[in-house]
Every structure is written in structure tokens, then in C-alpha cells.
């Protein structure tokens, strides 16, 4: 989600236009204020420059309607000339405002030079450790801890964190439910090739689909974008499934099960669901019961549906609406 015209300012440097604004929250929480800059013409890498508030007098108001109180000491204001200098130095240092990349973080010394922010430019290994903690908290429904761990990473452009934060906003887990924020983070993740985010957007934006939960019904439908995200999901799930990723195997089975982005093929769905189950994916047993019960007519088999239903129930991962009384009371192991 790019900077909105209201609340940001336009500046032209050379032949390019940029939008910039000041972050109030950083000032209130950490004693630092962030100057946020991005291309006005194309969403790309965002530049975030932090500076100590004590070095600057910051005017967040409109001087015509809400004149700021006189400064208590001679702080320097953040001026367009200063922003221009920041942009020029950042470009020279490798900032790519036209390309989709993780946010680039610097600190401003107040003496006319940018300093790489070691605090925010966390090493990849450290970032992944924090992500693992946040992801684990999310998976165990400790959403308060997940929000603390994942939101800074999501703001910093970490795709996995963006997906989980988008999911939290979608369902209101640990945060106030917000369809717009959910869409923002899911798109940010999908645009980096995150397959689950792309798949969720396929469902959410599909004019013929359902946008569960109800709060997401306000999202505008977009058939073209839905199809584009589905194509991303198919490609990425294939790549990751072939590489042995359990979740991607299960998702690929789901695509063949329903014919989403691929030809409807029950045999392929069963093949990928079974691979996912063998790799430790308990939920795949649930899906195997479904594909045998009501999937591709060429593979329907009530006995096998019952077997996998009972297997899912045994493993405590049964969550579908197939009732036991609708299936044979007992069946031999169809895999034997």
C-alpha cells in the first residue's frame, strides 16, 4: 500500500517524483521519527530513515489551519531540501525505488549523511529466527506473541511474516479484524511469490468465490487479479512440492481436487495428498476422505473415504462434514 496523497508530500528530484511523510508513531514510542520516502510513480522499495527527535523540530500540522507551537529550543525542521539530500544519498548507496524489494533502512546523523541502520537491517539468519518464533506462536494460537514478533518483520518486507499478518487481520486473530490491512499484507507477500498468500487472494478476489469471514465481503472482486494470483500459486506450489515441501504437496492436491488452475484430476489429487500425508501432514487424511467421497467421479470410493475419515479422526485432524453414519460402518484397509 503506497503513501496516500493526504498526509504525504510530493517532491521531484531530477526526473523522478517521490512522496514522503513523517511517522508519528515512531516518535511517540522510541524517541525517533521516521522519514518515509517512496516513488510516486511506481510501488517499489520504500526508504525509511530514522532520526532522533531532539535534533529536529517536526511540523506535522498544516501551518495555515493549525500553526505549530513555537519550538522550546532551536530544533532543525525536516525540510524538502533535507529530503532531497536523503534521496540523492540513498540512490547513490543503492536504493531502488522502482523495484519491489524489502524496505531499506537508514539513520540520519543530522550532519548531512546517511548511516545504515544495523538495528533495522537485521541479518537474514536473525530475521528467520524471529520469524520461526512468531510462526510457532501463530500456529499455537498465541496471537499476541505472534503479532509482536511478526509485525516488524512484515513491515520490513519479510514475505512469510506478511502472509501471517495478513491472515491475522483477515480473521481478527490478535489484532482488530481489518479487510483492507489483510489485503495489503497478503498482496505484499504474494507479490514476492508467497504461494499461500497468492492462493488466498485467488479465493478472496474471485467473483464466484466466498470471502470468508463475513468482514472480508467488502473487498472488491477482481477476476483478472484472482486469475493472476492463482497462476502464481500453481507455479510456486509445484516448485515447492517437487522440492519436498509438505504444505505445498497438500495445496497441490487441493488444486487438482477442485481443478483450480489445473485440470480436474482426482488421481493426481490423491497422489499429492498421499505424499503430504506420508511427509507428516495429518490434514491430508482429511482431504483424502473428501476426494474419495465427493471428488472427481473417476476416483470415488466410499470404502476408501471411510478409511481416510477414520484415519483423520484417529489423528485428531478431522474437520470436514462427512458424517460417520453416511459411510460404511466398517471397511478393510484399502491401502493394504
Image (cartoon, rainbow, N blue to C red):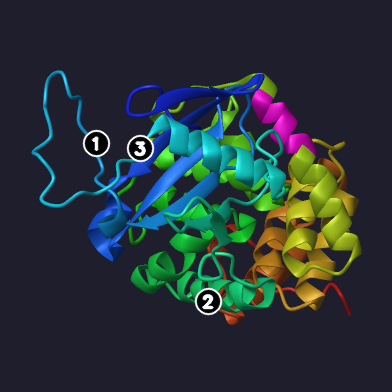
Looking at the image, can residue 183 be seen? no
Which one is in front in this view, the residue at disc 2 or the one at disc 3?
Answer: 2
Q: Residue 215 carries which label?
A: 3
Q: Are marks 2 and 3 in contact (CB under 8 Å)?
A: no
Magenta-tinted stretch: 225-231
**Answer yes or no: do the residues labelled 1 and 3 have beta carbons within 8 Å?**
no
- Which residue is more in the foreground, 90 or 193? 90
Q: Tell me which secondary structure the magenta stretch mostly adopts.
A: helix
Determine the image quadrant of residue 124.
bottom right
Percent of width and height locating residue 68 = 12, 34
- Tell me: 203 left or right of 218: right
Nearer-N-terminus badge (2/1): 1
Horizontal side of residue 164 vs 97, given as left or right: left
* Residue 169 location (% of width, % of height): 40, 49
Point out which mark residue 60 bears: 1
Return the mark for residue 136: 2
Q: Which residue is drawn at 23% across and 57% down?
A: 28
Whether 52 is among the magenta residues is: no
Q: Which residue does the image show at 39% across and 68% down from the upper left?
A: 148
**In x, y percent, where is residue 234?**
81, 44
**Element type where label 2 sits in the image:** helix
Q: Residues within 10 Å of mark 3 (few under 14, many from 20)?
A: some
**Mark 1, residues whose alpha carbon is within 10 Å: few (<14), some, or many (≥20)?**
some
What SS does tag 3 mark? helix
* N-terminal-most mark, 2 or 3: 2
Disc 2 from disc 1: Cα separation: 39 Å
Q: What element carries label 1?
A: loop
Amino acid at each position: 500500500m503506497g503513501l496516500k496523497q493526504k498526509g504525504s508530500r510530493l517532491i521531484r528530484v531530477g526526473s523522478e517524483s517521490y512522496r514522503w511523510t513523517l511517522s508519528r508513531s515512531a516518535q511517540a514510542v522510541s524517541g525517533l521519527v521516521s522519514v518515509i520516502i517512496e516513488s510516486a510513480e511506481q510501488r517499489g522499495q520504500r526508504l525509511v530513515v530514522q532520526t532522533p527527535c531532539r535534533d529536529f523540530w517536526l511540523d506535522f500540522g498544516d501551518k495555515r489551519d493549525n500553526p505549530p507551537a513555537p519550538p522550546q529550543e532551536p530544533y532543525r525542521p525536516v525540510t524538502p531540501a533535507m529530503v532531497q539530500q536523503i534521496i540523492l544519498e540513498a540512490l547513490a548507496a543503492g536504493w531502488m525505488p522502482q523495484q519491489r524489494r524489502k524496505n531499506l533502512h537508514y539513520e540520519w546523523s543530522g550532519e548531512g549523511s546517511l548511516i545504515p541502520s544495523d538495528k533495522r537491517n537485521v541479518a537474514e539468519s536473525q530475521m528467520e529466527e524471529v520469524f520461526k518464533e512468531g510462526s510457532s506462536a501463530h500456529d499455537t494460537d498465541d496471537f499476541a506473541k505472534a503479532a509482536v514478533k511478526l509485525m516488524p518483520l512484515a513491515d520490513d518486507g519479510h514475505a512469510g511474516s506478511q502472509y501471517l499478518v495478513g491472515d491475522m487481520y483477515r480473521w481478527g486473530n490478535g489484532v482488530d479484524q481489518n479487510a483492507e490491512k489483510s489485503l495489503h499484507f497478503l498482496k505484499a507477500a504474494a507479490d514476492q511469490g508467497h504461494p499461500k498468500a497468492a492462493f488466498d487472494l485467488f479465493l478472496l478476489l474471485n467473483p464466484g468465490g466466498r470471502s470468508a469471514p463475513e468482514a472480508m465481503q467488502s473487498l472488491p472482486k477482481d477476476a483478472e487479479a484472482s486469475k493472476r494470483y492463482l497462476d502464481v500459486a500453481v507455479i510456486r506450489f509445484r516448485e515447492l512440492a517437487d522440492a519436498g515441501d509438505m504444505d505445498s504437496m497438500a495445496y497441490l492436491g487441493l488444486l487438482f481436487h477442485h481443478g483450480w488452475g489445473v485440470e480436474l484430476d482426482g488421481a493426481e489429487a490423491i497422489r499429492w495428498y498421499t505424499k503430504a500425508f506420508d511427509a507428516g501432514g495429518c490434514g491430508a487424511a482429511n482431504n483424502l476422505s473428501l476426494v474419495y467421497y465427493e471428488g472427481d467421479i473417476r476416483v470415488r470410493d466410499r470404502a476408501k473415504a471411510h478409511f481416510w475419515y477414520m484415519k483423520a479422526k484417529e489423528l485428531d485432524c478431522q474437520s470436514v462434514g462427512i458424517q460417520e453414519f453416511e459411510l460404511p460402518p466398517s471397511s478393510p484397509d484399502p491401502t493394504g
